[in-house]
Image (cartoon, helix red, strand yellow):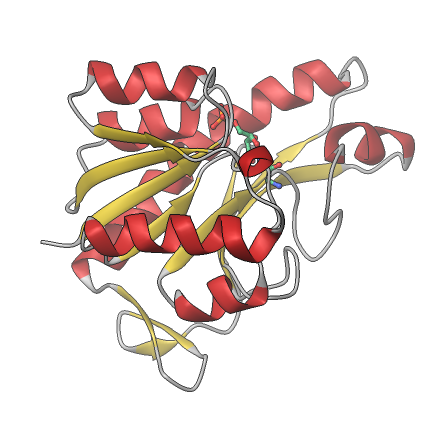
Amino acid sequence: MMKIAVLVSGNGSNLQAIIDAKVSGQIVGVISNKADAFALQRAEQAGIATAVIEHKDYPDRVSFDAVMHQKLLDWEVDLVILAGFMRILSPIFVNRWQGKMLNIHPSLLPNYKGMHTHQRVLNSGEVFHGCTVHFVTAELDAGPALAQSVLKVAQHDTAQSLAERIHQLEHFIYPLVVDWLCQGTLQYQTDGHVTFRGQALQRPIQFSQF
Ligand code: GAR
C-alpha cells in the first residue's frame, strides 16, 4: 500500500476529504509549517502522526525543505500531497519528489497561477472557474494537470462564495486523483508524461458542475 504524507498550512479541509474518502493509500503523516494550523487537529483526531516544521526557524528555503525531506524519508513516504500548503518549494526538493507529489490549486490552470485566484477571476469577468490537481514541478503551478473541476461563476458570487464553491469541488476531485495514483490507474512515466488507464493523458480529466 502506498504511504502518503500530506503537507498543510491551514484549515485542512482537503486533508479531511482525503481522510474521509478512505483512499487506497495509507496516510502516514501530516506536516505543517504552522503550529496553529487546524489541519493538525484533524490529523490527530484521525490518529495520524503529525510534525510541525516551521519555515521561520530556518535561514532559507533549502534548509527548511531538507528537514521536511528527511521527515518524509523517516516515514518512508511514496506520495506527497500538498493540501493548502502555502510555501514555495525549492527546485531541489521538488526534483527529489518528481512524479510523486501532487498539488491542488484553486483555478483552471494554466489560468490564474499564484494567489487570490477567486478575486482575480471576478475582476476579469470570467464565466468559468474551477480547480486543478496537478503534479508539482519546479515551476510554480505549472506541472502536468491531471484533473479539473469546473463551475460557472454566478452574478452574485463573491471571492468568499467562490472559495466555498471551489472547496466543494476540490473535496471531490482530490481524493479521486489520489486514489487513482495509489491504484496505478494514473501513472507518472519517467519521461514526464502521464498515463491514465494505460493511455497517454493528453489533457486533464474534466468534471463540471452544470
Ligand atoms: C484550497 O482551496 C487549495 O486549492 C488552496 O488552498 C486551499 C486550502 O484549503 N491552495 C492554494 O492556493 C495553493 N496555491 P484547505 O486547507 O481547507 O484544504
Quick check: 162 left or right of 203?
right
In the rendered view, would you say 176 is above or below 203? above
Please state, as top left, top right, bottom left or bottom right, where the C terminus lies in the image: top right
| Residue 177, x across and y down, in percent | 35, 50
Whether residue 154 is visible, yes or no, is yes
- Which residue is at the far left? 1
Residue nearer the viewer, 83 or 60: 60
Which of the 4 image quarters holds residue 83?
A: top left
| Residue 108, x across and y down, in percent | 65, 48
Quick check: 129 left or right of 171?
right
| Residue 9, x across and y down, in percent | 51, 29
Which of the 4 image quarters holds residue 28?
A: top left
In the rendered view, would you say 107 is above or below 43? below
Residue, x 88% and y 34% (percent of image)? 125
| Residue 39, x across and y down, in percent | 39, 21
Residue, x 41% and y 69% (percent of image)? 96
Q: Quadrant of ligand 1?
A: top right
Quick check: 143 left or right of 32?
right
Residue nearer the viewer, 20 or 91: 91
In the rendered view, would you say 135 is above or below 50? below
Residue, x 60% and y 52% (percent of image)? 61
